[in-house]
Image: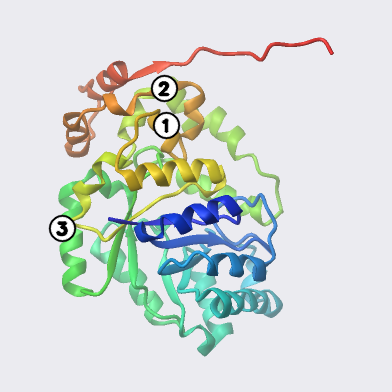
Amino acid sequence: MKFDIPYIPDREYTHFIQRHRDRIDSVHFGLHQGPVLDSRLRFKQVDTKRLAQQLNELLVPHSYCLLNTRFMAPDLYFDPLFLTGIMENLEILMEVASLDGIVFCDAYFLNALSSHGGNALGALEAVPGINCMIDSMDKARAYLELVDQTAFKPPSKLVLDRSLNRNPKALETLVIQLKKEYPELRLELLANEGCLFHCPFKPAHDAQISLSNTRLVRERGHEINREWGCMKVLLNNPEQLFKSPFIRPEDIDDYSSLVDTIKISGRTLGADFLKNTVSAYIQGSYGGNLLDLLDAMNWMADHFFVDNKKISKHDVNTLTNCTKECSHCEHCKQILDSTTHKKSIQFNRYTNP
């Protein structure tokens, strides 16, 4: 199994990818200058030419630029200077780094960019992002037909919604349908997001990130999630983490007959997180805290140690095939009790200077 992994402009991480490129199918990355156009906050500014040069050094088969913001300020759809700026960045990436395509979620943005860029975009795939939540044949067709009506190339791959990781019958049915109708399409699953199952906070959370990236409001996602969202749910009911549709490194082979690649997330958590997580998935095993590998639940590692090696294959099979009807079931609580301990609160010793 090969992987689609995040790329961030870090020299040691670049060398790490070079050493493991035989297991890497593609990298995905955001632009690091200009308006924030992807689905995460930006922490570092990097010139696009420099970014393209670093990407070119990776020597991996495919690369995809994340333009997957949920929405943007409405005037930008009609702003020729803004759209020209995006095209200039994409052209640099195409010329220097052999960019394969973009990842999108906002269909308005896709059409606006297609109309402005025209034939110059014919060499780039438009790949629906993970947050398009493609979990049915009807939804897959809707997005693929949308791309067909633009100047972009059809996508060579499609990432399926994370909920299907825990719904094997629905996953197998959709894969069979897609392979029959689009036999050349490579299929992908997201392994380590670690969000709540069918997270009810996600639509609003994605919108809040996009809104803060417009710079019209300040970012308050962590505070909101701690007080009113998923963080509060998980602290009050930590067994809910086992309902999350993650795929452990030990279990990726269970999906090898269905999909072509596994997607790893976590680019905002830094190079050390990415090296540790990608290494675990390449090795197919991890002996530490499962929470150290999960993107959205990584903060929980400060509170809990989930011994990954104590999670049995029987536990995983039960979680994967369960009905998700929790009112009369204690299985997640039982796994929590047998694999997890709460960390004690530690304070740094104060030294009088």
Q: Which tag, 2 or 3, sits closer to the chain's start?
A: 3
Which element is circle 1 on?
helix
Comparing labels 2 and 3, the label whose residue is closer to the camera: 2
Amino acid type at circle 1 is Leu
Q: CA distance from mark 1 to mark 3?
A: 30 Å
* Residue depicted at 59% across the width and 36% down the height: 222
- The residue positioned farthest toward the right in the image shown: 353
Amino acid type at circle 3 is Thr
Please give the residue where the numbered disc 3 appears in the rendered image: 173
Which element is circle 3 on?
helix
Q: Which tag, 2 or 1, sits closer to the chain's start?
A: 1
Query: Depth check: 345 or 234 in front?
Result: 345
Q: Position of residue 341 (x, y in %)?
A: 39, 16
Please give the residue where the numbered disc 1 appears in the rendered image: 291
Q: Position of residue 215 (x, y in %)?
A: 71, 54
Q: CA distance from mark 2 to mark 3?
A: 36 Å
Left or right, 346 with reference to 338: right
The numbered mark at residue 322 is: none
* Residue depicted at 54% across the width and 84% down the height: 115
Q: CA distance from mark 2 to mark 1?
A: 7 Å
| Image height of 148 relative to 214, above or below | below
Comparing labels 1 and 3, the label whose residue is closer to the camera: 1
Q: Position of residue 186 (x, y in %)?
A: 28, 67
**Cβ–Cβ under 8 Å for marks 2 and 1:** yes
Please give the residue where the numbered disc 2 appears in the rendered image: 305
- The residue positioned farthest toward the front in the image shown: 19
